C-alpha cells in the first residue's frame, strides 16, 4: 500500500516474527479465557470460511448496529469478498485459514511505530496485522484487500521471494481494482510523469528487491506507485485476464523471465522499455 496511506512490510523480519508469535499466542490465550472487550489487548476471535479474525478495537457496545459484533461481521464479510476477488482477479486462493489481527489504532501505533520508517496501516508477516478503526472505512477495506494479496502469495509459494514490484504492485493494483477503481487516477498519472521527467523513477532492477522497507518515505511513495503502475500496465496492455495466468506461471516455474515470456511474450528489459515509453 502507498506509504501515504501508511503501510510497510518486513521492516525487521526477526522482530516481526517474534512479535507475531507473541501477539498471536496472547490473542489465542485471551480468546480462550473469554475476557472483556475493547482495546485491552484481549482480542475477540471470530471465524469465517477462510479467515480467523482477532479484533481489539475499542467499540463501546458489544452488540447492536454499531457494536463490535456488527463490526466483526463486517470485517469478515469484507475479507470473504476480498477472497473471492483475489481468486477471480489474480487466481490466488489460499487453502488454509488466514489469521487477521485488527488492532486498536493507539495500541497498533504504540506496538509497531518503532518498526517502521513511516506510519503504518497494516502489514503482513505470517499473519495479517491491521491498524483498526471504529468503522469499516474505505481505507480499512483497502488495507484488508492489500494485505490479503501478500498473505495469498506467501501461502501459494512460502519460500519464494517475489520482487517487490510484483508483490506490492499486485497488492496495490488489487486493492484499487477490487473496490472498483480501474487504472491510475489523473493525479497518479501526473505524479508518475513528473517523476519520470525528473529522472526520479526506479529501474525494474531497483524495484526487484524483496521489499521496500529500507526505502525512505519519498522513495517508497514513488516505488509503490510505480509498482502499481507496472501491474496496471500489464493489465491494460495485455488484458486483465492474463494476470492470474502470470502469477500462476510465476508460482509454478519460480522464474520471472519464464513467466513474463510465457504469458506476455516479454522479457524484463522489454517490459521496462515499454513501461517508460508510455510515460513519455
Ligand atoms: Zn504491501
Image (spheres, rainbow, N blue to C red):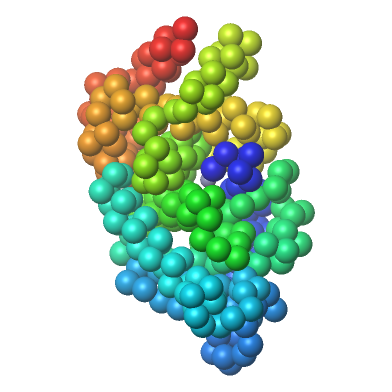
Residue at (57, 91) in percent of width and height: 34
Q: Nearer the viewer, residue 103 or 243?
A: 103
Residue at screen point 27% across, 34% down? 240
What residue is shown at x 31% (from left), y 41% (from top)? 247
x, y percentage for residue 68?
54, 76
- In this view, 166 is above or below 175: above
- Residue at 36% in and 73% down: 48
Depth check, front residue: 155 or 258: 155
Q: Which residue lies furthest to the bottom in this view?
A: 33
Indicate left or right for 3 with 228 as reference: right
**Residue 97 x/y as whole percent:** 38, 69
Give percent across and percent down for residue 243: 29, 36
Q: Can residue 68 be seen in this view?
A: yes
Residue found farthest to the front: 65
How many discs appear? 0
Query: In this orientation, which residue lies closer to the viewer: 116 or 61?
Result: 61
Q: Quadrant of the N terminus?
A: top right
**Residue 79 rendering spot, x and y as whole percentages:** 40, 61
Residue 10 in view of the camera: no
* 190 shown above or below 162: above
Amino acid at each position: 500500500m502507498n506509504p501515504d496511506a501508511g503501510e510497510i512490510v518486513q521492516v525487521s523480519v526477526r522482530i516481526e516474527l517474534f512479535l507475531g508469535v507473541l501477539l498471536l499466542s496472547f490473542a489465542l490465550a485471551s480468546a480462550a479465557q473469554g475476557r472483556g472487550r475493547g482495546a485491552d489487548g484481549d482480542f475477540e476471535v471470530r471465524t469465517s470460511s477462510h479467515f480467523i479474525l482477532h479484533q481489539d478495537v475499542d467499540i463501546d457496545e458489544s452488540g447492536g448496529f454499531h457494536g463490535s459484533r456488527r463490526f466483526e461481521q463486517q470485517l469478515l464479510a469484507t475479507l470473504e469478498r476480498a477472497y473471492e476477488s483475489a481468486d477471480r482477479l489474480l487466481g490466488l486462493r489460499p487453502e488454509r485459514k488466514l489469521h487477521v489481527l485488527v488492532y486498536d489504532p493507539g495500541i497498533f501505533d504504540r506496538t509497531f511505530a518503532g518498526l517502521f520508517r513511516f506510519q503504518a496501516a497494516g502489514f503482513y508477516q505470517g499473519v495479517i496485522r491491521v491498524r483498526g478503526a471504529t468503522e469499516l472505512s474505505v481505507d480499512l477495506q483497502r488495507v484488508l484487500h492489500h494485505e490479503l494479496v501478500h498473505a495469498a502469495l506467501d501461502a501459494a509459494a512460502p519460500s519464494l521471494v517475489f520482487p517487490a514490484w510484483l508483490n506490492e504492485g499486485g497488492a496495490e493494483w488489487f486493492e484499487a481494482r477490487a473496490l472498483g477503481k480501474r487504472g491510475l487516477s489523473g493525479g497518479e498519472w501526473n505524479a508518475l510523469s513528473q517523476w519520470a521527467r525528473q529522472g526520479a523513477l526506479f529501474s525494474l532492477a531497483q524495484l526487484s528487491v524483496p521489499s521496500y522497507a529500507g526505502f525512505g518515505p519519498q522513495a517508497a511513495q514513488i516505488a509503490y506507485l510505480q509498482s502499481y503502475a507496472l501491474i496496471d500496465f500489464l493489465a491494460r496492455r495485455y488484458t486483465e485476464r492474463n494476470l492470474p495466468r502470470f502469477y500462476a506461471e510465476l508460482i509454478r516455474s519460480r522464474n520471472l523471465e519464464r513467466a513474463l515470456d510465457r504469458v506476455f511474450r516479454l522479457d524484463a528489459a522489454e517490459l521496462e522499455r515499454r513501461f517508460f515509453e508510455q510515460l513519455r
